[in-house]
């Protein structure tokens, strides 16, 4: 065999080895692609189960409202909020504070998201408590949306305007009482909302769902009660946020359906 023939045979051997190696590489690549596709398909099925099964089980966004730390807060069940009033009742003057002076009353706010129970202090805020009890008895709040949620610096849910606009009044106004000199409003405090006029207290009030400091230069805000039940629900609504940044209507609509007020001593 000539040298040229040996070189040709060597080239053929080399080509066969290279072809076999290329074939094996293609086979390995095909196997890897198959494994990857199977893995992706499995992951897709797992994600679908995570996203779909809770909804099939009956959960909703309202059942898993994130709290301030981002964790879900379960148990919030709200029915559709009714439409706001267009022509709320109007009254000529505030009721006599003597009707509640020295008494402790209990107000139950029935809302579309659950009850909020407030202990009203007729000793420290007789005019405010008398007004609130009077308006409740007259059905003034039935219904009225909580139209404002503040989630930055000030942590309050504001209610009490049957029109839901934020400017409604019962037709009368009265002055300040039981205002904290240090401007501190602890979690659970219920106080009156007003305009810049210190005598503009009427029907609007706010629930403090987290400790809040308010300026004292304008006169402050009258504290007239403390939430004893339902503050966790208010916190869940606050955690869901406002539809207008840090200050606006709550994303979870909450409306007062009716308010009942009783004397604490008369309760069983």
Image (spheres, rainbow, N blue to C red):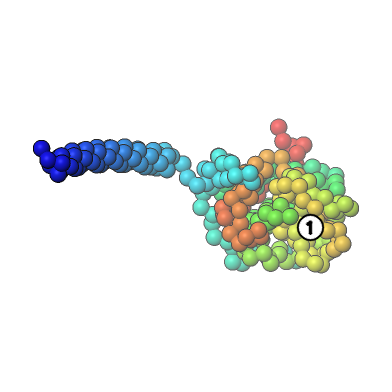
Determine whether, in the image, residue 88 is placed left or right of residue 63: right
Does residue 123 appear in the picture of this structure? Answer: yes
| Mark 1 Cα-neighbour bin, 10 Å: few <14, some 14–19, many ≥20 | some
Residue shown at the point (53%, 43%) measured from the top left: 64
**Residue 84 appears at what percent x and percent y?**
58, 61
Determine whether, in the image, residue 19 is placed left or right of residue 203: left
Q: Quarter-wise, where is residue 95 in the image?
A: bottom right
Please count the marks in the image. Answer: 1
- Give the farthest residue toward the right: 181
Observer-nearest of 71 and 28: 28
Residue shown at the point (63%, 65%) measured from the top left: 165
Which quarter of the rendering shows the C terminus? top right
Observer-nearest of 145 and 13: 13
**Residue 202 appears at what percent x and percent y?**
75, 61
Q: Quarter-wise, where is residue 175 in the image?
A: bottom right
Q: Is residue 260 above or below residue 220?
A: above
Observer-nearest of 7 and 155: 7
- Give the farthest residue toward the front: 2
**Residue 147 appears at what percent x and percent y?**
63, 59
Q: Is residue 101 above or below residue 143?
A: above
Residue shown at the point (65%, 41%) measured from the top left: 232
| Residue that badge 1 annotates | 95
Determine whether, in the image, residue 142 is placed left or right of residue 218: left
**Residue 154 appears at what percent x and percent y?**
73, 55
Does residue 258 appear in the picture of this structure? Answer: no
Which quarter of the rendering shows the N terminus? top left
Residue shown at the point (85%, 48%) measured from the top left: 124
Q: Secondary structure at mark 1?
A: loop
């Amino acid at each position: 065999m000539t040298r040229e023939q040996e070189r040709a045979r060597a080239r053929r051997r080399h080509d066969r080895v290279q072809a076999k190696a290329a074939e094996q590489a293609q086979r390995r690549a095909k196997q890897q692609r198959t494994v990857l596709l199977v893995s992706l398909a499995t992951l897709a099925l797992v994600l679908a189960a995570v996203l779909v099964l809770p909804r099939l089980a009956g959960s909703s966004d309202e059942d898993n409202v994130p709290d301030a730390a981002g964790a879900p807060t379960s148990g919030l069940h709200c029915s559709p909020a009714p439409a706001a009033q267009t022509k709320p009742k109007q009254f000529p003057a505030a009721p006599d504070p003597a009707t509640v002076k020295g008494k402790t009353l209990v107000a139950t706010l029935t809302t579309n998201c659950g009850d909020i129970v407030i202990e009203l202090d007729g000793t420290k805020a007789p005019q405010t408590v008398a007004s609130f009890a009077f308006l409740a008895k007259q059905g003034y709040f039935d219904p009225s949306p909580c139209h404002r949620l503040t989630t930055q610096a000030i942590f309050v849910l504001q209610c009490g305007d049957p029109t839901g606009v934020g400017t409604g009044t019962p037709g009368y106004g009265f002055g300040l009482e039981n205002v904290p000199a240090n401007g501190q409003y602890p979690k659970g405090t219920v106080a009156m909302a007003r305009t810049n006029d210190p005598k503009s207290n009427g029907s609007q009030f706010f629930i403090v769902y987290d400790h809040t400091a308010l300026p004292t230069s304008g006169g402050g805000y009258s504290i007239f009660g403390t939430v004893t039940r339902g503050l966790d629900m208010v916190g869940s609504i606050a955690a869901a946020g406002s539809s207008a940044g840090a200050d606006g209507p709550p994303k979870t609509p909450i409306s007062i359906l009716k308010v009942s007020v009783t004397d604490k001593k008369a309760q069983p």
